[in-house]
Image (cartoon, helix red, strand yellow):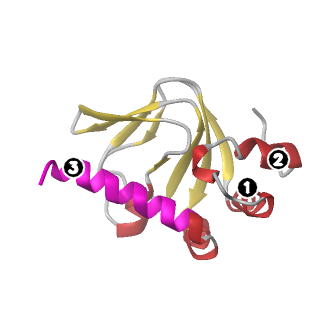
């Protein structure tokens, strides 16, 4: 899929769970703040221990998440990966590897912050995802 700022791309993003309830203008702004990336199966999206300068929103495809080489979970369309390093300014806590060919939106640190500041829905979805991830990591209470 090649991306642009065309209305077809804005509409296509409407089918991605992350963007449910977003207006066309909000999805267009997301496209303005991000860069589309296509990766082949087997590509390392983020590598545990690296400094985080980008995060990614999965638009198409699936990926596996590993911590210290152990499989933790899978991620698919609508999931954001790599955002934790941008939020807490620490090295990446996991490695994420593409299981299939993937289409992603890549956000640099500044544009990711803009996304969260300008769009309460995006901020809420990212925080909900992080909370769920932390609860899984902590295990049952």
35 vs 25: above or below: above
Residue at mark 3: 137
Label number found at residue 4:
2
Residue 3 shows in the view: yes
Observer-side mark, 3 or 1, equals 3
Callout 2: few (<14), some (14-19), or many (20+) C-alpha neighbours within 10 Å?
Answer: some
For the N terminus, give its image quadrant: top right
Q: Residue at x 50, y 59 (%)?
A: 125
List x then y, in percent, for residue 128.
41, 59
Label number found at residue 31:
1
Residue 92 shows in the view: no
**Horizontal arrangement in the rendering, residue 76 relative to residue 68 (left or right):** right
Label number found at residue 117:
none
**Horizontal arrangement in the rendering, residue 52 relative to residue 132 (left or right):** right
Query: How far apart are the two marked residues, 2 and 3, measured between alpha carbons?
Result: 37 Å
**Magenta-highlighted residues:** 122-141
Secondary structure beneath disc 2? loop
List x then y, in percent, for residue 27.
73, 57
Of residues 88 and 28, the one drawn nearer to the viewer in this rendering: 28
Q: Residue at x 63, y 43 (%)?
A: 16
Query: How far apart are the two marked residues, 1 and 2, measured between alpha carbons?
Result: 8 Å
List x then y, in percent, for residue 108.
57, 61
70 vs 26: above or below: above
Callout 1: few (<14), some (14-19), or many (20+) C-alpha neighbours within 10 Å?
Answer: many
């Amino acid at each position: 899929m090649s991306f642009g700022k065309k209305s077809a791309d804005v509409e296509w993003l409407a089918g991605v769970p992350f963007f449910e309830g977003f207006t066309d203008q909000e999805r267009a702004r997301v496209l303005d703040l991000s860069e589309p990336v296509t990766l082949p199966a087997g590509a390392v999206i983020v590598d545990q221990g690296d400094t985080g300068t980008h995060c990614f929103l999965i638009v198409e495809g699936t990926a596996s998440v590993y911590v210290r080489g152990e499989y933790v979970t899978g991620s698919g369309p609508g999931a954001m990966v790599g955002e934790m390093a941008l939020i807490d300014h620490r090295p990446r806590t996991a490695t994420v590897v593409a299981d299939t060919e993937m289409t992603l939106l890549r956000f640099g640190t500044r544009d990711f912050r803009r996304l969260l500041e300008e769009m309460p829905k995006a901020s809420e979805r990212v925080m909900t995802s992080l909370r769920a991830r932390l609860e899984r990591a902590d295990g049952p209470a």
